[in-house]
Image: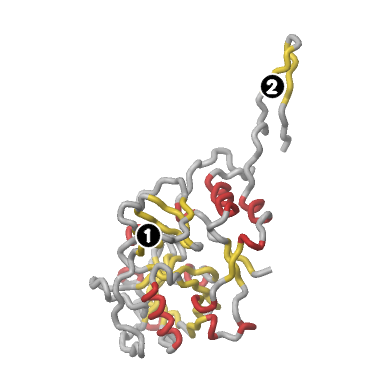
Amino acid sequence: MRRFGLVLLFVSGVVAAADAPSERPRPPTMAEVLAATLPSDWRGLDPGNTLYLQVPGGRVVIELAPAFAPLHAANIRTLVREKYFDGLAVVRSQDNFVVQWADPDGKRPLGTARATVPPEFTVPSQGLPFARLPDVDGYAPEVGFVDGFPVGRDPRTGEAWIAHCYAMVGVGRGNELDSGNGAELYVVTGQAPRQLDRNIAVVGRVVKGMELLSTLPRGTGAMGFYEKPGQYVPIQTVRLATDVPPGEREKLEVLRTDTATFMKLVESRRNRSDDWYKVPAGHIDLCNVPMVVRPQP
């Protein structure tokens, strides 16, 4: 494709500048932004807050968010260390919504984990490293990112919460606010169900292996639950990365969201400059900002 720079026209001895297609520099693409990143633009995963969920298809890596749900994260770590999840199953796969795992019989003892946990649907926003997006949002007065997690914020109440975007991990609960203890977890596999924001504890996100969950057969029962035990997808093990030998850990790092580089990436998605795009959107939804994960160099 031909590109033209500034064109000078000589009219009656006067130099005039004519507009040309490439007079304004083309914004970088996402690939170009990522190619220019520095080591300081990335961070590794904390082994003490990283879970390895092993299913027949492979390993799913989950990063916990203790800053937003410290009590739930602690209870989940207890459940994992006491091997509560080993041998349980994925019991639900609802189209365009969630995949959920739990004890199919509801009889497994919780060990030393808590049976109830106070609701952690929001946290105080003061002090959080909030990287705000300028885009409007229908579910929160302000939206942005905190340590890689998509977050809504309300300056009036001083509260913040993780948004229900794709790949976020939440805690199943009943009608009682304290009934979600982390023994039943789900991951968002469809269009972001933001109506759940501030109604349930979000405890983390999948950083690798989403395809192992999002492609599971859909449940045939109400709300996508599997109707027969033969449909369950077994959970072989769940381990904290810190309890796994270093040589067997996933060597991953995620793009930090508190940098100028990340904001350039957001802009590259808000106004796509790839040759295929003819009309830039000029807007981006919170849940459409990609969270970039790569193997450690």
Residue at screen point 67% across, 31% down: 23
- Residue where numbered disc 2 is placed: 17
The reply to whether residue 218 is in sight is no
> Is there any visible trace of residue 233 in the rendered image?
yes
Amino acid type at image mark 2: Ala
Closest to the observer, 297 or 196: 297
Q: Residue at x 40, y 77 (%)?
A: 101
Where, by quadrant of the figure, is residue 76 drawn?
Answer: bottom left
Where does the image place residue 278, in percent across and percent down from the top left?
Answer: 58, 38
Sequence-first disc among 2 and 1: 2
List x then y, in percent, for residue 125. Answer: 38, 59
Q: Which residue has dot 1 on it?
A: 160
**Left or right: 227 as drawn, with respect to 190:** left
At mark 1, the secondary structure is strand
Q: CA distance from mark 2 to mark 1?
A: 50 Å
Q: Residue at 41%, 46% (x, y): give it.
A: 136
Q: Nearer the viewer, residue 226 or 266?
A: 266
Q: Is residue 22 above or below residue 147?
A: above
Q: Residue 86 sits in which quadrant?
A: bottom left
Q: Residues within 10 Å of mark 1 (few under 14, many from 20)?
A: many
Q: Secondary structure at mark 2?
A: strand
List x then y, in percent, for residue 69.
38, 71
